[in-house]
Image: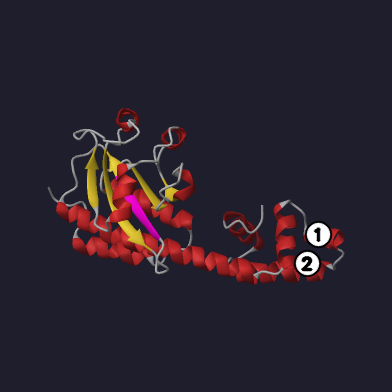
């Protein structure tokens, strides 16, 4: 079967990854890749510890149905997962088809796994181990019910996955640096702006002048690499700087 993306197109995809600025940008990009390869869902996740009881806390971005994730974690399926065990012991991409191979689990939940993924038509899944420059390990998966990926498609998706995971690490690192750079007053002003207060009202609340409040908000906007205070508030909320 012919790959949905020629080599030059894959290179274009990888070039695009470098220009993505937010996790949401990468989410939309990954949705397109998932559709291009005729899969149903993707997940980018950090490798859970062997003692982990849920997958959600290790997930970075995902298009898994909410009901699937809830059921997966309710049954604590990440515990004793043969997929996670393989990801911890190998850096080679692999393909898993639970429609043809019986799921062997030490906890006897293989039937639950099969029924759950059949329900959401995600019985065939490819996994691509990745890691950050810091050494943090993770993986990218593509799931659906199409025929098995060809060797060429596996190589392409592995190449894309490595760059996506690396870019997500860069974005998180940048967000952390921004968080450290903002002062308490700048964060206070962003918080009150998020609450719907004007500069005049914030000045009255904090005992400052309107000019000073605007100065703090302008500095916060610049540090967050945004164009106005509305975008600054949105980004501050996204990265957990304010609530």
Q: Secondary structure at mark 2?
A: helix
Residue 171, percent from left and from top: 48, 64
* Chief SS of the magenta region: strand
Given residues 8 and 63, the one toward you in this image is 63
The answer to whether marks 1 and 2 mark residues whose Cβ atoms lie closer than 8 Å is yes
Give the distance between the C-alpha atoms of the residues marked 1 and 2, in whole angstroms.
Answer: 7 Å
Q: Left of 206 or right of it: where is 34?
A: left
Per the image, is 42 magenta? no
Location of residue 101 (image quadrant): top left
Q: Which color scheme did the rendering employ for the protein?
A: secondary structure
Location of residue 144 (image quadrant): top left
Per the image, is 141 magenta? yes
> Relative to 114, does residue 223 appear above or below in the rendering?
below
Which mark sits nearer the N-terminus, 1 or 2? 1
Residue 66's tag is: none
Q: Residue at x 17, y 52 (%)?
A: 3
Q: Residue at x 43, y 61 (%)?
A: 168
In the image as oriented, which residue stretches furthest toward the left?
1
According to the picture, the residue beneath numbered tag 1 turns out to be 202
Residue 34, percent from left and from top: 31, 48
One can see residue 139 in this view = yes
Q: Residue at x 36, y 62 (%)?
A: 131
Residue 213's tag is: 2
Residue 223, percent from left and from top: 61, 71
Q: Left of 207 or right of it: where is 90?
A: left
- Disc 1 residue crowd, few under 14, some 14–19, many 20+, Cα 10 Å: many
Q: Which residues are magenta?
A: 137-142
Q: Residue at x 61, y 66 (%)?
A: 179
Given residues 221 and 182, the one toward you in this image is 182
One can see residue 224 in this view = no
């Amino acid at each position: 079967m012919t790959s949905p993306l020629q080599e030059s197109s894959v290179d274009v995809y990888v070039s695009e990854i470098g220009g993505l600025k937010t996790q949401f940008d990468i989410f939309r990009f990954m949705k397109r890749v998932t559709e291009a390869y005729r899969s149903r869902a993707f997940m980018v996740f950090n490798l859970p510890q062997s003692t982990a009881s849920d997958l959600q806390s290790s997930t970075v971005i995902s298009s898994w149905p909410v009901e699937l994730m809830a059921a997966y974690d309710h049954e604590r399926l990440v515990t004793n997962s043969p997929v996670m065990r393989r990801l911890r012991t190998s850096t080679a991409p692999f393909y898993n088809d639970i429609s043809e191979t019986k799921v062997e689990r030490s906890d006897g939940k293989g039937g639950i796994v099969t029924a759950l993924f059949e329900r959401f038509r995600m019985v065939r899944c490819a996994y691509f181990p990745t890691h950050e420059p810091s050494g943090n390990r993770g993986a990218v998966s593509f799931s659906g019910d199409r025929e098995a990926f060809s060797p060429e498609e596996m190589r392409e998706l592995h190449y894309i996955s490595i760059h996506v995971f690396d870019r997500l690490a860069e974005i998180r690192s940048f967000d952390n640096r921004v968080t450290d750079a903002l002062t308490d007053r700048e964060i206070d002003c962003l918080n009150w702006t998020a609450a719907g207060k004007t500069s005049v009202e914030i000045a009255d609340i904090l005992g400052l002048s309107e000019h000073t409040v605007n100065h703090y908000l302008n500095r916060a906007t610049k540090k967050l690499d945004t164009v106005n205070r509305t975008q600054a508030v949105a980004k501050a909320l996204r990265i957990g700087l304010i609530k």
